[in-house]
């Protein structure tokens, strides 16, 4: 196996360390100073050797974490002609098409920047859509965390569980999750106002949820509106416990509180974004995608 050095950006230190240990590789941390004008000053704590893996998720502050990822990638390229950009949560991936006239497809610029910085490969985890992945002009791999999330739920004693996608766009994800868990799935109909961001769930008659424990599955939770509205709707149908699970829990502002108040018992996410819900580790999956 090729020898690797893993460099952990400040947004993904723990995950970077775990990945280095899975790959039996050297780990190098980075030091971040933020200047009074807001600029990031990054220093590598040691010299990398061999193939280099840079791990840095791009979650809030998104633009700063993106620039920090680019800076580390470009420094890594000075030491190696093999630089793997591991960006477990790739901010901007939702901006993969023009929804309203004049909107800029910013993920396309991000893809160009990551290559221009010096990355020779990119690995992401549960990217919002494959459209974004196809914009990279370097080998790009998406790793799915679903099997790891399912392992967590297999350990719980759930009452006649049913997997639910909060929207039709996530039906494939819910189907995969349900298949691995060995249960059924359904999808709700969610509508989001493209201008205001307001979310509504189409009212219907979902008698099948009555008395059953539910697992709401999404790729990410940002403001929490999608999960909150889905949970409120399902509670009205007299379901059992509701769990919410996703790969990337951004949980902006009071999202967690909103979700809990809507009746969700627990939020379970992965460590692509550090935080108290990020209890499912994806380092083994990433390691497998690299070797
Ligand atoms: C949308 O298509 C995504 O899959 C998520 O459902 C959405 O991004 C979650 O955002 P929020 O938590 O702000 O509703």
Image (cartoon, rainbow, N blue to C red):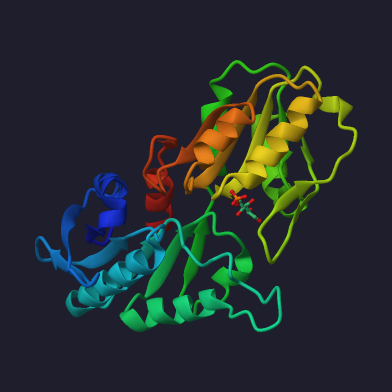
Q: Residue drawn 53% across and 21% down?
A: 155
- Front residue of 289 and 261: 261
Q: Position of residue 199 (x, y in %)?
A: 71, 51
State the quadrant of the N terminus.
bottom left
Location of residue 16 with respect to 105 vertically, above or below: above
Q: Is residue 118 left or right of residue 168?
A: left
At x 24%, y 45%, the residue is 21
In percent of the image, x 88 and y 26: which residue is there?
A: 207
Could you tell me residue 283's position as x and y percent?
37, 46
Question: Vertically, is 76 above or below 225?
Answer: below
Vertical placement of residue 56 versus 162, above or below: below
Front-lying residue, 14 or 39: 39
- Picture quadrant of residue 127: bottom right
Residue 85 image-quadrant placement: bottom left
Residue at position x 58%, y 74% in the image: 134
Percent position (x, y) of residue 26? 17, 54
Can residue 148 be seen by looking at this rendering?
no
Q: Residue furthest right?
A: 205
Q: Quarter of the image containing the C terminus?
A: bottom left
Q: Quadrant of residue 114?
A: bottom left
- Side (left or right) of 121 relative to 260: left
Whether 144 is drawn above or below 105: the answer is above
């Amino acid at each position: 196996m090729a020898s690797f050095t893993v460099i952990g950006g400040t947004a993904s230190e723990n995950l970077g360390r775990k990945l280095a240990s899975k790959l039996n590789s050297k780990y190098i941390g980075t030091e971040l100073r933020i200047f009074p004008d807001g600029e990031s000053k990054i220093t590598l704590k040691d010299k990398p050797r061999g193939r280099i893996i840079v791990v840095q998720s791009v979650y809030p502050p998104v633009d700063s974490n993106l620039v920090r990822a680019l800076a580390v990638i470009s420094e890594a390229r000075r030491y190696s002609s093999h630089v793997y950009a591991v960006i477990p949560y790739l901010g901007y991936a939702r901006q993969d098409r023009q929804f309203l006239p004049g909107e800029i497809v910013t993920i396309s610029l991000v893809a160009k920047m990551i290559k221009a910085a010096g990355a020779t490969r990119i690995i992401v985890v549960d990217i919002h859509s494959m459209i974004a992945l196809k914009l990279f002009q370097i080998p790009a791999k998406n790793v799915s965390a679903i099997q790891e999330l399912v392992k967590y739920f297999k350990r719980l004693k759930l009452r006649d569980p049913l997997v639910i996608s909060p929207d039709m766009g996530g039906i494939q994800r819910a189907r995969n999750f349900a298949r691995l868990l060995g249960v059924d799935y359904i999808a709700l109909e969610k509508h989001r106002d493209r201008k205001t961001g307001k979310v509504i769930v189409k009212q219907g008659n979902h008698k099948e949820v009555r008395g059953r424990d539910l697992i709401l599955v999404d790729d990410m939770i940002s403001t929490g509106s999608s999960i909150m509205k889905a949970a409120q709707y399902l509670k009205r149908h007299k379901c059992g416990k509701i769990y919410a699970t996703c790969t990337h829990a951004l949980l902006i502002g009071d999202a967690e509180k909103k979700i809990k108040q809507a009746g969700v018992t627990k939020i379970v996410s992965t460590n692509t974004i550090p935080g108290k819900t990020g209890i499912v580790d994806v380092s083994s999956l990433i390691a497998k995608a690299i070797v």
